[in-house]
Image: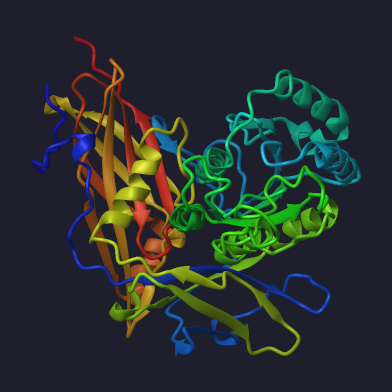
Amino acid sequence: MRFRIALGLTFALAALRGDDSPELRLLDMNVVALDSHEQPVNDLTVDDFQVTDAGKPHKIVFFRHKDATLRPTPKLAPNEFSNRAGAAIPYATVILFDLMNEGFGSRGYAANQIIHCLEGLETADNLFLYMLTIEGRLFAVHGLPNVEEGPDAARWTKQIKQRMDTAMRAVLHTRPPEVDVAIRTQLTFAALDALGLELSRVPGRKNVVWVTDGVPIGLGPVRSDTGEFVDFTPQLRQLSQALERSGVAIYPVRQVMLGSPDSIGATSGGSGATGGSGMGMQSMSTLTEFANVTGGRPNLGKDIGAALKQAMNDVRVSYQLGYYAPENNWDGKFHKVRVTCKRKGVHIQAKTGYYAWALPPGQRSEQAIRSVVSTEFDAAEIGLRGTLSIDPKDQYSALLNVRIEAGDVAFGQVDDRSDAQLRLAVVGYFSDGRIEGSQVLPFDLHYSAAEREKARNEGIALSKSVPSDQIVKVRLIVFDRGSNAIGSLTMPVNTPAP
């Protein structure tokens, strides 16, 4: 039986596409407010902030204070599921130890630093450690849990020396042939994208301390595998958009011994400090760019402990704010953004700009939803809970009833109305391994003050009829076009007995 929805929309993953409805672009930003001692300031209001885009002030229409606590998931009823019912991780700090882009001389030094600073931590709550191996894959030394872990999970760093030694033996048992720098850069970008997608399981802010020698943003003809100029700027833009969608901020720490032959990412071109070609930036500038466009903190020194302390400090309290950008903003250029605080002595850490891509209508939603389809886990930036039951009137259909956590949705304030633009897709997973998904469905919300308050207390209700013939599980994906947040909920289809 062809996978169909009751509304008559044909399901086919290859045909998954965004809707063509007009999009009012709410530009969303996560910011950290710090005092003169670099400590978080957690009592600011929307009136304390100012935003300028290309030097022009904009009214903040969306504001939310994000602290370290999650709204508790209500007790689930029988056969009810939630994408936040597992290990409750409100935020995450991740160390990414980049073996692929670390020179041999700095690799051991960085490993010892990581061991030293982790051994001295009083608590490792919501702290995780991954390696980027020399083959370009992610290896979890202590990764996000798939199931609820016991009380000792927060003390995993006490055995970090043994864990690190075991991990290093596992990933450095052989050395593959030298990887071309262009391919290495692309593999690095792909790994960062995969890590961002993995971290979408965490609803709050995610800070990644990237311990690396860095990668170039461009290559001259001497160093490229084709003998031509290679510019990685488009890939960097695309990756920054994906990391922003996952709420990831990069805190780079560059370990390279400058001037050494192990400075594998030091230049962007053929020879000399400027690369000889006059094209691209040095990898130090590339790392700064990663920090700036994701709202992280540039740190090109060698102190991993200081960077980790700051990342763990910044992740606990942040603010989310948004403003509507005019239509003529989408000119394909980089736009500088500045967020300031009116309160004296408070400085703001936020992304310094964005790439104003003029995307076709619906493409942004399609890209976000496609990124979740093939994952084995559910994204939890938007809280979802619901049930899936066989329709008593039709054994080949199932009734999908879901509540969307309204507090996770970006509502822009327009006059006395609160508006949000959600996009939905339903994906069916067949017993033979096939995956088929719906078109992207618009789900726009226009609430009065009373309606929004009700949604905050009860959730946003959604009900649909979906096919169930030959399908083993159904996944609902919800994308917020305002905040770029995404949530998904996977539920098994219980086939009725004959």
Q: Residue sitting at 74 percent across and 45 percent down?
A: 125
| Closest to the observer, 416 or 419 | 419
Image quarter of residue 332: bottom left
**Left or right, residue 31 beside residue 58:** right
Classify residue 301 as left or right of residue 264: right
Q: Quadrant of the N terminus?
A: top left
Q: Going by the image, does 497 lie left or right of 31?
A: left
Q: Nearer the viewer, residue 449 or 290?
A: 290
Q: Quick one: which residue is furthest to the top in this view? A: 498
- In the image, residue 309 sits, relative to residue 187, either above or below, namely below
The x and y percentages for residue 389 are: 27, 30
Q: Residue at x 51, y 69 (%)?
A: 29
Q: Position of residue 16 (x, y in %)?
A: 22, 42
Q: Quadrant of the C terminus?
A: top left
Between 317 and 148, the one lying in front of the other is: 317
The colour scheme of the drawn protein is rainbow
Q: Quadrant of residue 338?
A: bottom right
Visible residue check, residue 419: yes
- Which residue is the extreme one toward the left? 8
Visible residue check, residue 205:
no
> In this orientation, which residue lies closer to the viewer: 226 or 290?
226
